[in-house]
Amino acid sequence: MLDSILESLSGMGISDLIDIAAVSMVLYWILLLIKGTRAIQMLFGLLVLGGGYIVAQEANLSTLKWILDNFLGSIVIVVVVLFQDEIRRALALVGSNPLTGMNIREQKHIIDELVKSAFSLSGKRIGALIVLERSTGLKNFIEKGTAIDGVLSHDLLLSVFMPFSPIHDGAVIVSGGRVAAAQCFLPLTLNPSLEKVLGTRHRAALGLTEETDAVVIVVSEETGRVSLACEGKLYSRLEKDELTRLLEKLLNLGGATRPGKWWERMKVAVSTGEKSAP
């Protein structure tokens, strides 16, 4: 067997190595994408069915083999139906800069206003949910909220989330650098691994980022902590400079791409409740 393996390896060319590396990267990316979601459980279930099919074939269990054969024969449709949220999320990750058309100074001004607003609300212990639209359109959520279409500013965001404001409940959605709507309600995450300490705002932020590529800033009313949700993950206990750098990375300001290792060090283990804000 070792000889046959060595013979196969000796016959591989550069294109074969590139092909293997590309497939490995895609599989690794897919595993990272579905890590911590319900998709892992469904994937494990499909693997169990696949193992059962092999056993049925080897043991000549004709009835079981026939059932699994018909089921697995439609595996493409089954995968699309079961993993539609993950597929939609994966396609949405090929994001574009939501602040396209603005110069760097205007983009920095918007980020500064967002950070200033988040920490002003944090200091007053006023809860807030601010959604930043990226490549995935949020028109369905915007239309169900209260239309504003105003220039994004610190004063506007504070006036929206003040407890006496009639539109302080729900989320504000920022699209194209403008406050598109307020009082928008987001889907709650159904991730069963999350701790119960996470409140409705944080669950709504995670729920939206599981379905879209949006970035959501969350201010906890109970603790005043500022968090950020993206790609179904929650990053908590952020300071002003940390939130600024995160937004610059995620909004691709100045040509930045994906968050680096320092982002990963700030990652909150929401499944264990570590550092997560309620």
Image (cartoon, rainbow, N blue to C red):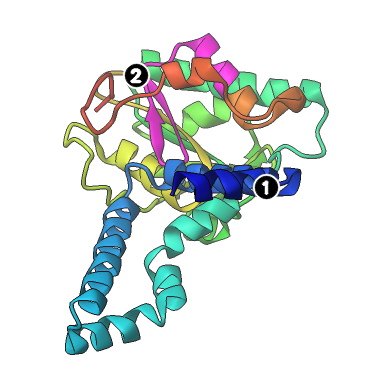
Image location (x, y in percent) of residue 159: 48, 30
Q: Residue at x 60, y 55 (%)?
A: 137
Looking at the image, tell me whether mark 2 or mark 1 is earlier in sequence order. 1
Image location (x, y in percent) of residue 96: 70, 43
Q: Which corner quadrant of the image does residue 72 belong to?
A: bottom left
How crowded is the residue under tag 1: few (<14 C-alpha within 10 Å), some, or many (20+)? few
Secondary structure of the residue carrying tag 1 is: loop
| Depth check, front residue: 254 or 27 | 27
Q: Given the image, on which type of amino acid does mark 2 rest?
A: Arg
Q: Is residue 199 magenta?
A: no
* Disc 2: which residue: 225
Q: Quadrant of the C terminus?
A: top left
Left or right placement of residue 258 versus residue 225 in this view: right
Q: Which residues are magenta?
A: 225-246
Q: Given the image, on which type of amino acid does mark 1 rest?
A: Met
Left or right placement of residue 194 versus residue 69 in this view: left
Q: Residue at x 40, y 47 (%)?
A: 34
Image location (x, y in percent) of residue 188: 32, 50
Q: Report if the CB atoms under discs 2 and 1 are less than 8 Å apart.
A: no
Left or right placement of residue 216 versus residue 194 in this view: right
| Depth check, front residue: 62 or 90 | 62
| Depth check, front residue: 63 or 195 | 63
* Disc 1: which residue: 12
